[in-house]
Image: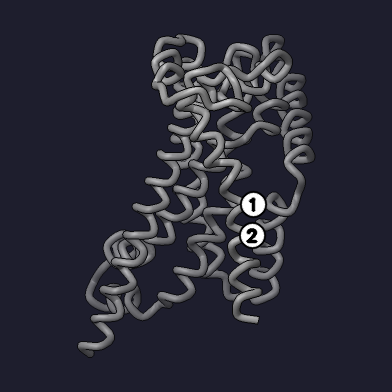
């Protein structure tokens, strides 16, 4: 049984990571091939950094991901605090369930509903050119579908922390807002950072919602790669994907390191007490 579980675990890791490792390997391939590795080369990385179209898509993707991550983190943290403060159990359960709906919906449903919503907005305000609201529409759409993940990350931290520290700060003369920013927020920061990293990676990776909501004058990396599949994906996209994987992996390491450090500090404080 022990060896069977290890074999099963290795199989799962192989299925998950062999495709990613293959992509990374062929990003260093000298030839334009995914079947024959002819030699190690940085050719496709050099080509990547000399492509203005790719860099424009990368810039658009990063701007959208950073802004949507910041907005969803701010709104999601405030929403998590608001949900925690609710006293009616049934209302809290209902709001939590409604909050989780976007996570359960298929992306295509969310994308189509967003498209219809912005079409209705254009009709109401007599807007003829979608490109004029294209980027704000994409930002709203990305923030909306990232929001539940931030709440899911922050709310358990707030629940675990409880009201003791905040009430002590209020007794010492802090206003509720000051108590939140000086006492509660530093203690729930690992959850906030985890939610922000998750929102950033979700926005970075999104294709379906961007496809339905995106304007013609604002192209993200997933949309650019999809447009290439009609012909052939060039190896410089493998190089770009490798760089994205490295950045996301580094962000996850930093987030996990901070969470672990915070947990160790809390454990030491409990031990001292």
Image location of residue 114, percent across then percent down: 72, 33
Q: Is residue 218 visible?
A: yes
The picture quadrant where one finds residue 145 is: top right
Quadrant including the N terminus: bottom right
| 115 lies above or below 102 | above
Image location of residue 150, percent across then percent down: 52, 54
Q: In front: 31, or 54?
A: 31
State the mark number for residue 15.
1
| 112 lies above or below 18 | above
Q: In front: 146, or 239?
A: 239
Quadrant including the C terminus: bottom left
State the mark number for residue 11.
2
> Which residue is pictured at 59% across the width and 62% down the height?
10
> Which residue is pictured at 56% across the width and 24% down the height?
221
Answer with left or right where residue 127 lies relative to residue 178.
right
Please report contact status of discs 1 and 2: CB closer than 8 Å, yes or no.
yes
Image location of residue 112, percent across then percent down: 78, 33
As helix, strand or loop, the secondary structure at mark 1 comes to helix
| 249 lies above or below 255 | above
> Would you call the spot at circle 1 few (<14 residues within 10 Å), some (14-19), or many (20 or more)?
few
> Which residue is pictured at 73% across the width and 16% down the height?
230
């Amino acid at each position: 049984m022990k060896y069977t579980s290890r074999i099963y675990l290795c199989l799962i890791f192989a299925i998950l990571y062999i495709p990613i490792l293959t992509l990374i390997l062929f990003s260093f391939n000298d030839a334009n091939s995914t079947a024959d590795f002819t030699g190690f080369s940085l050719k496709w990385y050099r080509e990547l950094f000399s492509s203005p179209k790719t860099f424009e898509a990368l810039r658009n993707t990063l701007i959208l991901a950073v802004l949507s991550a910041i907005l969803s983190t701010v709104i999601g943290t405030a929403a998590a605090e608001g949900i925690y403060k609710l006293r009616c159990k049934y209302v809290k359960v209902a709001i939590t369930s409604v909050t989780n709906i976007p996570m359960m919906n298929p992306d295509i449903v969310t994308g189509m509903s967003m498209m219809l919503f912005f079409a209705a907005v254009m009709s109401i305000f007599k807007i003829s050119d979608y490109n004029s609201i294209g980027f704000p529409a994409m930002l709203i759409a990305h923030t909306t579908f990232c929001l539940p993940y931030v709440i899911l990350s922050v709310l358990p931290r707030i629940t675990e922390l409880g009201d003791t520290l905040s009430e002590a700060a209020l007794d010492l003369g802090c206003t509720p807002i000051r108590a939140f920013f000086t006492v509660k927020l530093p203690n729930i920061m690992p959850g906030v950072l985890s939610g922000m990293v998750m929102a950033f990676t979700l926005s970075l990776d999104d294709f379906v919602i961007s496809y339905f909501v995106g304007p013609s004058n604002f192209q993200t990396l997933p949309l650019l790669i999809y447009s290439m599949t009609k012909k052939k994906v060039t190896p410089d996209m493998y190089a770009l994907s490798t760089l994205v994987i490295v950045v996301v992996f580094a962000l996850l390491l930093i987030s996990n390191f901070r969470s672990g450090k915070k947990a160790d500090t809390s454990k030491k404080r409990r031990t001292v007490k």
